[in-house]
Amino acid sequence: MLQKPVSHKETRISQEMNYMGIAKRAFRNISRRKIRALLVVIALGFSMAIMISIPAGIAANQQATQNLTSNLSGTITQTEASINQTLTQIDVSLTPSAPSGFGFSRGDFTSGQFGGGGNFNFTPGQFGGGFMPGEFGGGAFGGGRSSPMNESVYTDINSSLSGVAAVAPILQVSEGHNVTTTMFGRSMTRLVADYVIEGVPLNSSLIDNYPILPSNLTAGRNLQVGDSGVVLLSENNSAYFGAGVGGAVTILGQNFDVIGIHGTSGVSDRTTLYMSLSDAQALTNNTGYITRLMVFADSSGDTTSVASAISALHTELDVVTSQQRLSQLQQVQATYTSQLQTAQATMDQTQNQALEEIVVAVAATSLIVLFVMLYTVRERTKEIGTLKAIGFSNLNVMGQFMLEGILLSLLAGVVGVAIGTVAAPFLSSVLLPTMSPFGNSGFSTPLGASGASTSAIVVDPQLMLIAFGASILLGALGSLYPAWRASRTRPAEAMRYE
Amino acid sequence: MSELVLKTENMSKTYTLGKRNVRALSNLNLEVKRGEFIAIMGPSGSGKTTLLNVLGCIDKPTSGKVLLDNIDVAGMPESQLYKIRRNKIGFVFQTFNLLPYLNARENVELPMENIGKSKAERSARAKELLAMVGLSGREEHRPQRLSAGEQQRVAIARALANDPAIILADEPTGNLDSKNKQEIVKLLANLNINHGTTIIVVTHDGQVAAHTERLLLLSDGKISKEKQGLHLARKLICPYCGGKLHAANEICSSCGKVAITKKKPPVAAAVETGK
């Protein structure tokens, strides 16, 4: 446009649209009827909020299930490996007095730990009775517990049975605190183990030949024969106590020197600290008592006969061979797998339902824009006629009304994202069916309601961008026909006398 | 000044109402020279508005030619017609038709929006026009803050925005009280005399017609009577037959009808016209 217009207007005629003018009028028109715009924006905003909170809910739930799956399968694999390593091992403890669950009466909750040799009293009903993904493998898995038994049992088994290669008496005591959680109106108290003290006999024939101490040290040294007043911490313990190798920790009022740190390859080890049996007995006031025996048979073929001999000798004892543990574990795995499949099926169904809801929300948004804009166009026939009479092109008029619809919808998008971000957990719990990912275990989890507080429902920025994009698109879609109608308005409508 | 701005040749317009054909305009021939100030009068249904719509390119004739600045616009498609309306024609409506959400200046800028003028150019031109119609200092007022007469001035300024070949006004004083009516009529006459603006006014009002220099009486879609030099005579013209009205009561001397609009009591009319 370097050329200067010579004299007359014709040279200046340009067909381009004046977008600023169009935008200004579209914006002024929306703000002209504030109440109407507000109502429309709120109505649209809710549709938008639904659109963004459903995917957020589903994503959260998928995340929760994924966490659950990966945690559990990791646990099972590790446990299986550790069981296989010790095929000759038989675990002996007092038969649990009652099915495990919540409400521990004393502070001496002894965790039935995977791999650590506790009880594997898994039944499907008990499985997942309140566990959360984050807690998997944290020590409270399963929940079997044993009471202390007299050390004489050890002597009996060690001296009188054939086929027994070695017996390791173990004292295991959990120290923790009670946690009360309120979920779905129910208040539950459970003990969360801060650390587990495991007293191990530091006897060279045992610690040299049998896997009673952790093998994967990350720092320091392992326990040795004759050690006293020292502990081997897990990495978790080290963090909990804030002490490393060479430091000292205070456990139940007594000081211990930290001689080493073990890693967490064995699932059970995460919160377990090791010390000598006599230290542990003295420390926990359990002199003369142990909580379990690790019996090692001469060969893996002997374990069944040795186990029945132990049961015959002490009927009060619960005797579990590694084969039994393995099969129990496989049972757990099978149960879990089938439950996971059920959960997956429910999830698929939910997603279909969610998709329908989103389609409805999308349709509703477009329809709201459509009707509002149709009404606006009708109402403003005279104005449109005037614009055309004074020389506005069809395209120009169409542009103005399209932009008005898009602007309205975009405003609604902003409101929707705001509502959605705040109300996503609520909305998705209302809109998605309640489902219990793990059968009738414990309590059911509304699919949307943050997977029982593990994976929070978060409307991520990408979803927000999509929502803004969708609002522009839906605004354009909804106002297409009304804007076209507006552009077809006869300019003679300007003559209408009202 | 004898250049033709507008010319129709055997122009007809037929509406189809159900199965009936209604002939609104029949073989109408009209020539408008640049700088003319023309009033079109006639009873209801005589085709006044249809004629104005066709001349203003917002309606198309069924047959015949409409030459606007020597361009035949009768058969022009909408894709070109809007530019004719924008660049060649200025419309003034009975109901002003200002956009309520735009202020006076923005309303005047509207027709200039798509012709490649810069914002500053548009604004300057709008202010100049508003000054011309006597609205300096009220540029930023929205229509609801302006009186009816002021709104019509804004509309006239808007009609002038693109320096059109012709101004078409449909009952421009129909919604105004007598004082504002006088002002608008004077404004139009002033534009015609001092700026040479070509104006066609459709009106029922003899007083308005009295300011024009040429009166066309329309009946049954034809120009039935034509009178020249009325503004010099300063006589009141009967909207029904073109005869002379009695100055005091506005009763036609030849057809005997009362020419004033229903809204206005004869007394007020007498006061107004009795000067």
Image: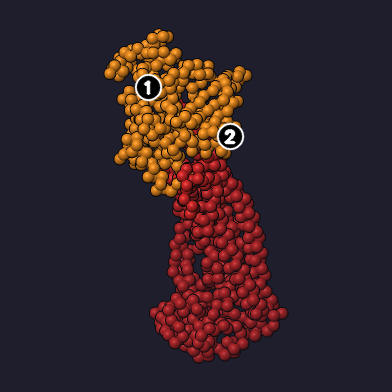
Chain colours: A red, B orange
Q: Label 2 amino acid?
A: Met
Q: Is residue B86 above or below residue A337?
A: above
Q: Chain of mark 1?
A: B
Q: Is residue A73 above or below residue B191?
A: below
Q: Nearer the viewer, residue A190 or B150?
A: B150
Q: Nearer the viewer, residue B245 or A449?
A: B245
Residue A87 in view: yes
Mark 2 or mark 1: which is in front? 1
Q: Label 1 amino acid?
A: His
Query: Mark 2 Cα within 10 Å, few/some/many (few <14, many 20+)?
Result: some
Residue positioned 48% across, 54% down in the render: A2
SS at badge 2? loop
Please give the residue where the numbered disc 1 appears in the rendered image: B231
Residue A409 in view: no
Tell me which label, 2 or 1, sits earlier in the chain. Answer: 2
Please give the residue where the numbered disc 2 appears in the rendered image: B76
Residue positioned 57% across, 36% down in the render: B78
Q: Is residue B13 above or below residue A450?
A: above
Q: CA distance from mark 2 to mark 1?
A: 36 Å
Q: Nearer the viewer, residue A472 or B142?
A: B142
Residue positioned 52% across, 75% down in the render: A270
Which quadrant does the C terminus of chain A fall into?
Answer: top left
